[in-house]
Image (cartoon, helix red, strand yellow):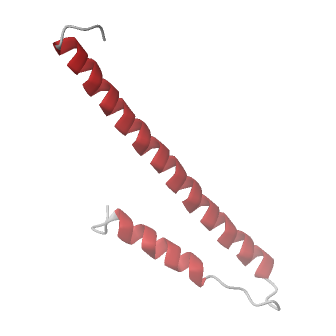
């Protein structure tokens, strides 16, 4: 595993993707543009999934703390 932070890795990936360009006369332009679009989609979906997981983890922690607190106070969990 690298010593780079997650933020550094993501910023580098975004910068690399941003640099991908294909001239209108480049015979490989469609393939290059497609790969750029796929890379962007992968990062977007990964960020969306990571956010959903983080929010779910936070909700689980909050629900657990609430349940433990209710049990300690003598209420039903």
Q: Residue 17 occupies which quadrant of the picture?
A: bottom right
Percent x, y for residue 37? Answer: 68, 68
Query: Looking at the picture, does residue 20 appear above or below residue 62?
Result: below
For the C terminus, the quadrant is top left
Which residue is nearer to you in this view: 30 or 74?
74
In the image, 36: left or right of 14?
right
Residue at screen point 58% across, 54% down: 45
Percent x, y for residue 73? Answer: 17, 13
Query: Looking at the picture, does residue 73 appear above or below residue 43?
Result: above
Which residue is nearer to you in this view: 36 or 1?
36
In the image, 46: left or right of 77?
right
Residue at screen point 31% across, 61% down: 1
Q: How many marks?
A: 0
Percent x, y for residue 75? Answer: 25, 8
Q: Residue 36 occupies which quadrant of the picture?
A: bottom right
In the image, 66: left or right of 18?
left
Which residue is nearer to you in this view: 71 or 19?
71
In the image, 25: left or right of 35?
right
Residue at screen point 52% across, 47% down: 49
Residue at screen point 81% across, 89% down: 24
């Amino acid at each position: 595993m690298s010593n780079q932070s997650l933020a550094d890795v993501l910023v580098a990936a975004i910068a690399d993707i941003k640099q991908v360009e294909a001239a209108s006369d480049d015979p490989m332009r469609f393939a290059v543009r497609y790969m750029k679009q796929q890379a962007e989609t992968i990062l977007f979906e990964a960020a969306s999934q990571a956010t959903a997981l983080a929010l779910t983890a936070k909700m689980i922690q909050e629900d657990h703390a609430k349940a433990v607190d209710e049990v300690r106070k003598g209420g039903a969990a």
